[in-house]
Image (tube, helix red, strand yellow):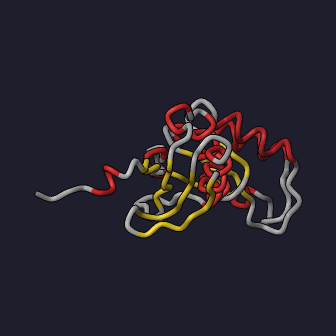
Amino acid sequence: MIENKVEKSGLITFNLEDFYPKGERVSFDIASVLFQGLILKEKDFREFIKATDWSVYSDKYVSLVCTADAIVPIWSYMLLATALEPYAKKVVFGNLETLETVIFSEALSNLSLTDYQDERIIIKGCSKYPVPVSAYVKLTSMLKPIAKSVMYGEACSTVPIYKK
């Protein structure tokens, strides 16, 4: 009979990809609506906001960026967020990496840690989804005060991170 030693070890594997919210991630670059690629004209921008079909962002996670070397007023991002909010799952200022960080941070902040009290935990390393490093750091910070130990990797080859 084959014996599952990992199961008997009492180790709990925590897989961050289980917290990966489904949905397309897209970036909206405000540079595409700047006059001559440099200036944001308020009147033209407001017309653009009104004329755009924002429903194309339905159920998507949206990051707002500006790739042009231009001074963009803060209110322009606020207007974009207001236009996107009824459709998008989430709107953040920053690149796609920032978007992933925010998404995972929110997902982890809702996590109940009672099942992990005084347990030996392995935070699984490999993932099918792009789990940001920030999620591993946040999870480690959350588990350290309550876990008996925290390790990284797979049950067959872990890297010790913390031991009480």
Q: Is residue 22 left or right of residue 50?
A: left
Tell me the quadrant of the picture where the N terminus can be found.
Answer: bottom left
Residue ID at (48%, 44%): 19
On the image, the x and y values in percent for residue 35 come to 80, 59
State whether residue 147 appears in this view.
Answer: yes
**Up/down of 94 relative to 44, above or below:** below
**Up/down of 158 relative to 96, above or below:** below
State whether residue 53 appears in this view.
Answer: no
On the image, the x and y values in percent for residue 159 come to 53, 68
Q: 92 or 44: which is nearer to us?
A: 92
Residue ID at (61%, 53%): 135
Q: Is residue 80 left or right of residue 139?
A: right
Q: 27 or 138: which is nearer to us?
A: 138
On the image, the x and y values in percent for residue 139 come to 61, 49
**Up/down of 9 relative to 158, above or below:** above
Q: Is residue 49 left or right of residue 17?
A: right
Residue ID at (78%, 67%): 68
> Furthest residue to the left?
1
Q: 56 or 138: which is nearer to us?
A: 138
